[in-house]
């Protein structure tokens, strides 16, 4: 069975393109789980055990790229 996800409403997208901060934050919150999942990296500690951690630099780069794509989006 295929999972269905909620989508960002069209009016929120239009408001975000126009630069509305609230709409941009709604889109950021929508994509936050995806960006966090894509930012996970394995880190080895001094004993040699692997730990799954969020790469904050990569997460910030993904968020920056999302914001630039939102503002550059054309309808």
Image: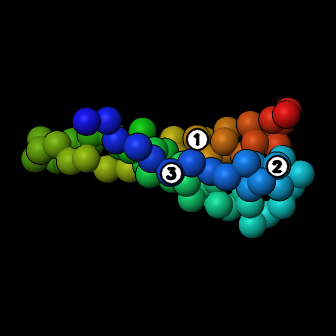
SS at badge 3: loop
- Indicate the quadrant containing the C terminus: top left, top right, bottom left or bottom right: top right
> Which of labels 3 and 1 is toward the front?
3
Whether 2 is drawn above or below 60: the answer is above
Residue drawn at x 50%, y 51% as measured from the top left: 6
Q: Measure the C-alpha gap from mark 2 to mark 3.
A: 17 Å
- Closest to the observer, 5 or 45: 5
Q: Residues within 10 Å of mark 3 (few under 14, many from 20)?
A: few
- Indicate the quadrant containing the N terminus: top left, top right, bottom left or bottom right: top left
Q: Residues within 10 Å of mark 1 (few under 14, many from 20)?
A: some
Q: Earlier in the sequence, mark 3 or mark 1?
A: 3
| Res 39 quadrant in image | top left
Give the labeled residue for mark 1: 62
Compared across the picture, whether 1 is left or right of 48 comes to right
- Closest to the observer, 62 or 72: 72
Residue drawn at x 26%, y 42% as measured from the top left: 43
SS at badge 2: helix
Q: Quick one: which residue is furthest to the bottom in this view?
A: 22
Residue drawn at x 85%, y 33% as measured from the top left: 74
Horizontal and vertical percent position of residue 63: 62, 47
- Closest to the observer, 58 or 72: 72
Q: Earlier in the sequence, mark 1 or mark 2?
A: 2
Do residues under tags 2 and 3 come within 8 Å of each other at their CB atoms?
no
Q: Measure the C-alpha gap from mark 3 to mark 1.
A: 21 Å
Give the labeled residue for mark 3: 6
Whether 66 is drawn above or below 6: the answer is above
Horizontal and vertical percent position of residue 24: 73, 57
Horizontal and vertical percent position of residue 11: 77, 54
Residue drawn at x 74%, y 37% as measured from the top left: 69
Give the labeled residue for mark 2: 14
Residue 73 seen by the camera: yes
Compared across the picture, whether 64 is left or right of 55 comes to right
């Amino acid at each position: 069975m295929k999972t269905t996800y909620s989508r960002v409403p069209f009016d929120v997208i239009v408001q975000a393109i126009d630069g509305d901060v609230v709409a941009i934050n709604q889109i950021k919150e929508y994509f936050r789980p995806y960006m966090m999942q894509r930012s996970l990296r394995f880190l080895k500690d001094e004993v040699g055990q692997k730990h799954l951690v969020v790469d904050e630099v990569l997460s910030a780069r993904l968020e920056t790229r999302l914001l630039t794509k939102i503002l550059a989006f054309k309808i």
